[in-house]
Amino acid sequence: MNRHPRCNAEQHRLSRRRVLQGALGLCAGAWWGLRHRGLSAAFAAEGKEPPRQVLFVWLDGGLSQLESWDPKPGTQFGGPFRAIATSVPGLHICELLPEMAKRMHHVAVVRSVSTKDNSHSAGVPRILRGDPKNRGVVYPYLGSAVAKLLGPCPSGMPPYIWVKPGSGGFIDKYAGFLGPKYGALALGEGRPPQNLLPPKDLPEQDLHDRHRLRRLVNRHFVAGRNAQINDAYEHAYHMAQALMSRRKLFDESTISDEERDRYGRTQIGQHMIVARRMLEAGARFVQVTSYGWDTHGDNFLAHRSLVPKFDRALAAVIDDLVASGRIEHTLIIAMSEFGRTPRINGHVGRDHWPEAWSVLTGGCGLQRGAVIGATDQQGVFVKTEPYDIGHLFHTWFTALGIDSQHTEYDNNGQPLPIAHDDCFPIKELLG
């Protein structure tokens, strides 16, 4: 096994305790999988492939690659944390990720990401849109793009669901030129939209008649007006109706104590449970957002607090996806808008660094246990072929069964590429 040249080999071996803890987690995941193989089995029985889905974990503000997927202990900028061995021979990640260390054989890490923008205001939308060439239009975010290109799942669930802290609602601006219909349904604090459930004393027939009247009024209203906006409103109503019929998804009494502990009794842990349930129910693209990663000050204390919560939640959902077989058709992405500077500033923090950072991805036929690219000894620059976000978009679309280099959007007669023209899929990632 190749070990990091500055690492203490004894410290990095997977201890007996960690192996047993991992086994317990995998057993719990397997138990969950046996209970939730219904969808995959149903499609297999019909000779069909299950719908491809996406779990997108967004660590808003900028996860440090040095305190996660590309540690450089013992170097000038390495910081105080050790690198630890993983389930992939020769691969070491930060000690703050002990649960993911036991599961790296299920996923891949790209250590040679190099992008352009070092500000949140420019970096966030550019990364989430795939950094397309400027054609005078606002491109959709990845979730809206997938919802459009793959369409809704057969379940009838909302195609783009966003589980986030704070308030919720329908966020149409992320759809760009695709139109508000492809926006995100945000579940604030993982809860259903307000007033989702009708009054208990409202008869079912009355509810049906109200919806019929609403559709009739809508048809008259849209005459001579912006049909796209009306379509978005109608789409929002359809999504609300779909969730009404699945309100048990939000019944917290059906989440066991064991499940809460496995995911972690933290905000991201509990939101990840909701996200997994949305995938189970058939949503096409589910995003989980965690805030607070912009660590200009006290970077190491902040990552000591944040990373283990993320580690536990991500490991648990991967266990469940593996146990149920869903990982074969679920694309997993965990990323930020950029990485953080190798140089440590005067506030013991790390600033914004798009020049060399890492992205975790896996599932949906991507190479398991792969490590793509490398940075130099200090972690300052990429020393192998650099990959921009456009390369990742091409790779993700390809994994989802979309021909990214020949498929185009139709923007009112204007053909537009779905990913940056000058980029291409990362072959080493594709199975």
Image (spheres, rainbow, N blue to C red):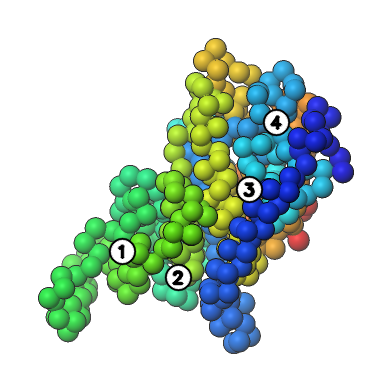
Under circle 4, the secondary element is loop
Q: Looking at the image, do the residues carrying marks 2 and 1 touch, with CB atoms under 8 Å apart? A: no
Gap between marks 2 and 4 measured at Cα = 40 Å
Residue type marked 2: Ala
Q: Position of residue 154 (x, y in %)?
A: 47, 76
Circle 3 residue: 99
- Using a 10 Å C-alpha cutoff, classify the residue at mark 3 as few (fewer than 14 neighbours), some (14 to 19) or many (20 or more): many
Viewer-proximal residue, 181 or 192? 192
Look at 56% across and 51% down and name the residue there. 314
Task: In the rendered view, tell whether residue 358 sits above or below residue 56.
Answer: above
**Quadrant (top left, top right, bottom left, bottom right) of the N terminus:** top right
Residue 11 drawn at (x, y percent): 76, 35
Q: Which residue is mark 1?
A: 236
- 408 lies left or right of 266: right
Residue bearing the label numbered 2: 281
Give the residue number, with chain letter if any, for mark 4: 82
Residue under the point 53% across and 79% down: 38
Q: Within 10 angstroms of label 1, few (less than 14), some, or many (20 or more) residues?
A: many
Left or right of 26 in this view: 61: left
Measure how far apart labels 2 and 1 are at the Cα level: 18 Å
- Element at label 2: helix
Residue type pointed to by label 4: Arg
Mark 2 vs mark 4: which is more N-terminal?
4
Residue extending furthest toward the front: 17
Residue type for callout 1: Ala
The amino acid pointed to by label 3 is Glu
- State which quarter of the image contains the C terminus: bottom right
User: Which mark is first along the chain, 4 or 3?
Assistant: 4
Mark in front: 1 vs 3: 3
Q: How many marks?
A: 4
